[in-house]
Amino acid sequence: MTSTGSLFESVTGSLMFPLSFVFVLSVVVFFHELGHFLVARWCGVTVKAFSIGFGKEIWGFNDKHGTRWRLAWIPLGGYVKFLDDESVASTPDAEALRNLTDEQRRGAFHTKPVWQRAAVVAAGPIANFILAIVIFAAIFTTYGVTTLEPRIGKVVAGSPAEAAGFKVDDVVLKIQGEEIDDFADLQRIVSTNPGRDLEFVVQRGREITALVVKPHLQEHEDAISGKITRPVIGIMSSAGAERIHKTVGLFEAIGLGVERTSGIITGSLGYLSDVVLGRQSADQLGGPIRIADVSGQVAKFGFHALLQLIAVISVSVGLINLFPIPLLDGGHLLFYGIEAVRRKPLSERTQEIGFRIGLAIVLGLMVFATLNDLPILKKWLS
């Protein structure tokens, strides 16, 4: 009985990673593509296919408008394909356009005004941001908000905080002029400012003191992500710090959802900027393997935690798709912006070269992310 029970736990534990991964990514991809789909329909574009996943179809059906809704075997993304698309990346099919009837041309995506095409393309990332805001708002409405007083309980010996003069029981009031009400806000600011001088205003007894500290990079073990390098200053929260829990109404929850979503966007952009400038390690950049690993780890904490992960990944997917790289939504928006200025689209040859460059960049990023994820793959195999 014991060996059978252990085997069952091992199998179910192993299945948790792929199932959680497929669930998380499918939800994010569905809402991204739904954004494209809904605005395309609103603009009168004929949609040939709405696919979750790539490759051979597992299951599908045709709706009354002739759109094929499909689930495919490779759960690494999805697409909405329009009448005159050459590929799932929505590259124009010049030959197909020339052979369309007048009635078909009215439903062609690439014959629509540039503002409509831009709206259709932008709708995907916007849908991702809206999904994140809704999830965060729902969580805040259901569970309320808990804040931890930013009181210092420990100053690590030899750390930047000790060198700057921090003391146990100091209460952080402001960082760089921003008021701090929660220890999590302190962590957020420190983690996004490696190598930068930060001015802290702390309350020490009845005195208000200003201290300047520079976060440094330190490798540590994260319960979910494994070994990561992160900016720290060497302080910990106090066990006696006051915790405040409050319920929030719907409108306040939506505001907090917007705030959390914008915080993820600015934090992600700041991290990428620091990676480019050499201020942070690129070890946190990962691909499908890392998403699968994190999904499985987070699923152990329950559906509530998995929803939060969906929100975070949804923001990341929306943000990445807005990068001005051909093949991505941002690349299409770049082309449409140039078209709006020139009053005519770029030549077919120029667009083709752009898409090839974009494909090379995307493939390069995928290879880099996979190499970053090899330690996770090694952990699975062991």
Image (cartoon, rainbow, N blue to C red):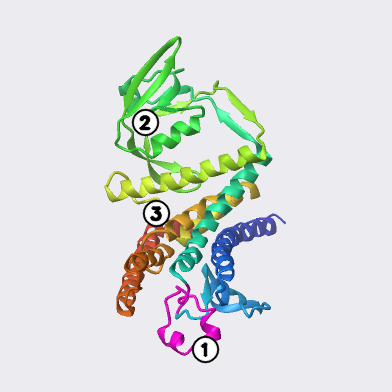
Q: Mark 3 or 2 closer to N-term? A: 2
Residue 233 is labelled as: 2
Where does label 3 land, which residue? 285
Residue 70 percent coordinates (x, y) = 61, 75
Is residue 222 rendered to the left or right of residue 14? left
How packed is label 1: few (under 14 Cα within 10 Å), some, or many (20 or more)? few
- Measured Cα–Cα span from mark 3 to mark 1: 47 Å
Q: Mark 2 or 1 closer to N-term? A: 1
Q: Label 1 is placed on what type of residue?
A: Thr
Q: Label 2 is placed on what type of residue?
A: Ile
Badge 3 vs badge 1, beta-carbon distance below 8 Å? no
Q: Secondary structure at mark 1?
A: loop
Residue 18 percent coordinates (x, y) = 57, 62
Residue 138 percent coordinates (x, y) = 65, 45
Where does label 1 land, which residue? 101
Q: Quadrant of the N terminus?
A: bottom right
Q: Is residue 336 above or below residue 148?
A: below
Q: How many marks?
A: 3
Judge whether residue 159 can be spotted in this image. Answer: no
- Label 2 or label 1, whichever lies nearer to me, is 1
Which region shows up in magenta?
87-112
Q: Which residue is most to the front? A: 343
The rendered magenta stretch, by its main secondary structure, is classed as loop
Q: Is residue 3 above or below residue 304?
A: below
* The one of 76 and 240 positioned closer to us in this rendering: 76
Q: Mark 3 or 1 closer to N-term? A: 1
Q: Which residue is most to the right? A: 1
For residue 67, which quarter of the picture? bottom right
Q: Residue at x 57, y 30 (%)?
A: 147
Is residue 198 rendered to the left or right of residue 249? left
Q: Label 3 is placed on what type of residue?
A: Leu
